[in-house]
Amino acid sequence: MLALAISGLTMRFPGLDTPVLSIDRLHLPAGGRLAITGASGSGKSTLINAMTGLDTVTSGSVCWGGTDIAALAAGKRDAFRAANIGLVMQDFHLFPGLSAFENVVLPVRLSRRLKPAECERALHLLETTGIARPDQAIETLSRGEMQRVAVARALLSKPGVIVADEPTASLDRRTGSEVAELIVRLARDEGTTLIVVTHDPALMERLDRRVGLDGGRIVEDSSEVLAA
Ligand SMILES: Nc1ncnc2c1ncn2[C@@H]1O[C@H](COP(=O)(O)OP(=O)(O)OP(=O)(O)O)[C@@H](O)[C@H]1O
């Protein structure tokens, strides 16, 4: 599991006078479970893109267990993300025309040959996430099942952290609640740090800390409220 230490982080975009994101300090211990909330446009996706290295930051540092990914070139950030960060997105990002199993192993297969142990782990993760037929075509699964496949895929390479961007937002309440329970349980069982952007109260209450954004700044931090 990985600890996160963000400091002096800003993200600016061309044509805008002020930074879209300005985070003085955000630390999360290894194994921590953090919810990020905030209104539309408050900077949640921009923060996720910065902390996962999907975007280049304007200034500041984003350290995962001692590696400052803000100081890495894009190619090295991509390699760090592939090795250390499991991503789960709102709209699943699965590939039609492939089976559930093929979707889980696709990111590894795109970079190198799949090892037999990874093949076994993919099948085990699909079983753990409640997918009974690994060879079922992905487009025939229910939405809840699709998100379960995306969770299994995120965990295949034993990442130190799972970052999920509104993972239950496109699911109905009951299915969303089941997926929320699954993500938190697997993060605990697999020993990964967990960071989730969510408005979902059922998911938020399963995490130990909530940070709220407004105008790209942290305006609320439940751990500081508790410490005060
Ligand atoms: N590439 C970009 N160029 C210019 N402005 C951007 C860019 N990306 C994001 N922004 C702006 O940054 C602000 C924060 O956007 P962001 O997508 O991070 O918000 P969000 O909290 O994730 O919103 P939502 O909940 O609606 O997805 C918004 O005002 C958005 O218009």
Image (cartoon, helix red, strand yellow):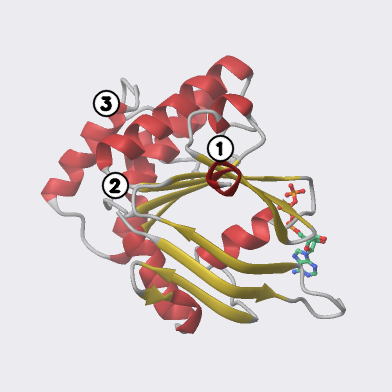
Quarter for ligand 1?
bottom right
What label does residue 167 carry, if any?
A: 1
Whichever of labels 2 and 3 marks the residue nearer the N terminus, that label is 3
Mark in the foreground, 2 or 1? 1
Q: Residue at x 74, y 76 (%)?
A: 12
Element marked by disc 3: helix
Indicate left or right for 109 with 54 as reference: left
Q: Are marks 2 and 1 in contact (CB under 8 Å)?
A: no
Name the kind of residue labelled 1 in the image. Pro
* Dot 2 alpha-carbon crowd within 10 angstroms: few under 14, some 14 to 19, many 20 or more: many
Q: Residue furthest front?
A: 228
Front residue of 1 and 177: 1
Front residue of 97 and 12: 12
**Residue position marked by numbered label 2 in the rendering:** 156
Whichever of labels 2 and 1 marks the residue nearer the N terminus, that label is 2
Name the kind of residue labelled 3 in the image. Glu
Front residue of 89 and 59: 59
**Residue position marked by numbered label 3 in the rendering:** 127
* Dot 1 alpha-carbon crowd within 10 angstroms: few under 14, some 14 to 19, many 20 or more: many
**Residue 83 picture location, percent across and down:** 32, 63
Q: Residue at x 56, y 15 (%)?
A: 174
Indicate left or right for 120 with 1 as reference: left
**Residue 42 picture location, percent across and down:** 76, 54
Element marked by disc 1: loop
